[in-house]
Amino acid sequence: MKNPTDRHPIKVVARRTGLTPHVIRVWERRYKAVTPQRTDTNRRLYSEDDIEQLRLLRQATIAGHSIGQIANYPIDKLRELLADDAVYATVTSGPLSRLLPPREAASRPVEYFIQESVAAIEQLDERALERTLALADMELSQPVVMDEVIVPLMVKLGDWWREGAARAAHEHMASAVVRAQLATMRKIHAPREGAPDIVITTPHGQHHEIGAQLVALVASAEGWRVTYLGPNLPASEMAAAMRLRNARVLGLSICFPPEDPMIVTELRQMRRLLEPGTTVLIGGMSAPSYRSVIEEIGAEMFLDLKRTRDRLRQLLNTGMAIHMDEAPAR
């Protein structure tokens, strides 16, 4: 049984609420959502009530509420809000209602959410897929949801497509639900104060955007100010957006097809149009087939979200992204 006087460090709070430490600090500093105690060395310590407050705030923001409006609601009012909220009711009603985790329940295994998602896709059951992904986001941390649920699920769907086991309808429905879920997950993040800008998109001819959305979510979680431009953007528009946002980091996802000469042309033109010293991060399933041109234009290739996350954190923490005008041209 939990002792209400217990105090916990921010890493424990992050694990139990599903929020990143950065978001917890922003909600504390900007919105006064909680007021943790401080140790003699200025480390934050959070109470059980603080953790419950943050957990409920996260669920409410997932349901569409603005953190600025609800940050100071007491716990009882947050519970009433969630109980009455139509979006939350959708998640907690129907045959999957038994899956809603109690306050102190342990997370279900990742494989459970993949299996439930696969079953929903096979049946073209949009609502079941929405509920399953929403429940995964409640029970698991965002990195786990991205790296171990959504990415394997989309890889599996791609395999089905190539094998002829999935119809276009399966791919379209699943992609639409995943895109919506990723957009919802990104809503809870706020950029660090004075954070640098990153522009994220896919090159002209690249219509699959889930990889780019995943990178946008990773960058938002790390505290970047993200400008997400969707898929299929010509090089000239990328360069214009970078100038308008005064951004020095560009993230691209290349999913399908591999070895497309048009993509090679677009990447070369993009590099010519970007400001010297701009950092370009490129990932996606088909990125390795463009390795030679990626190296030619001085871009960096990342084949998984963990390495992308680490690189974005490094850029942010070292100040390289803020002071890229001091970097030599590639």
Image: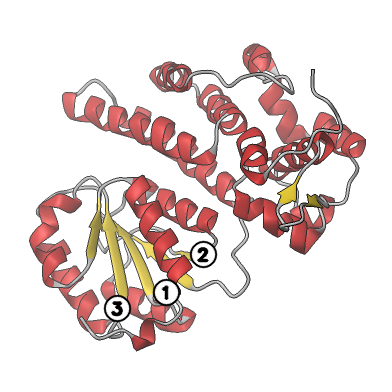
Image quarter of residue 3: top right
Q: Are marks 1 and 2 in contact (CB under 8 Å)?
A: yes
Q: Is residue 260 visible?
A: no
* Residue furthest out toward the front: 40
Query: Which residue is rendered at x = 22% and y = 77% of the image?
Result: 271
Label 1 sits on a secondary structure element that is: loop
Q: Earlier in the sequence, mark 1 or mark 3?
A: 3
Give the residue at mark 1: 321
Label 3 sits on a secondary structure element that is: helix
Query: Which residue is rendered at x = 55% and y = 61% of the image?
Result: 223
Give the residue at mark 2: 224
Q: Is residue 202 above or below residue 121?
A: below
Q: Position of residue 300 (x, y in %)?
A: 24, 63
Q: Is residue 178 above or below residue 323?
A: above
- Closest to the observer, 105 or 174: 105
Q: Position of residue 164 (x, y in %)?
A: 19, 23
Label 2 sits on a secondary structure element that is: loop
Give the residue at mark 3: 236
The residues bearing labels 1 and 3 have C-alpha atoms spaced at a distance of 22 Å
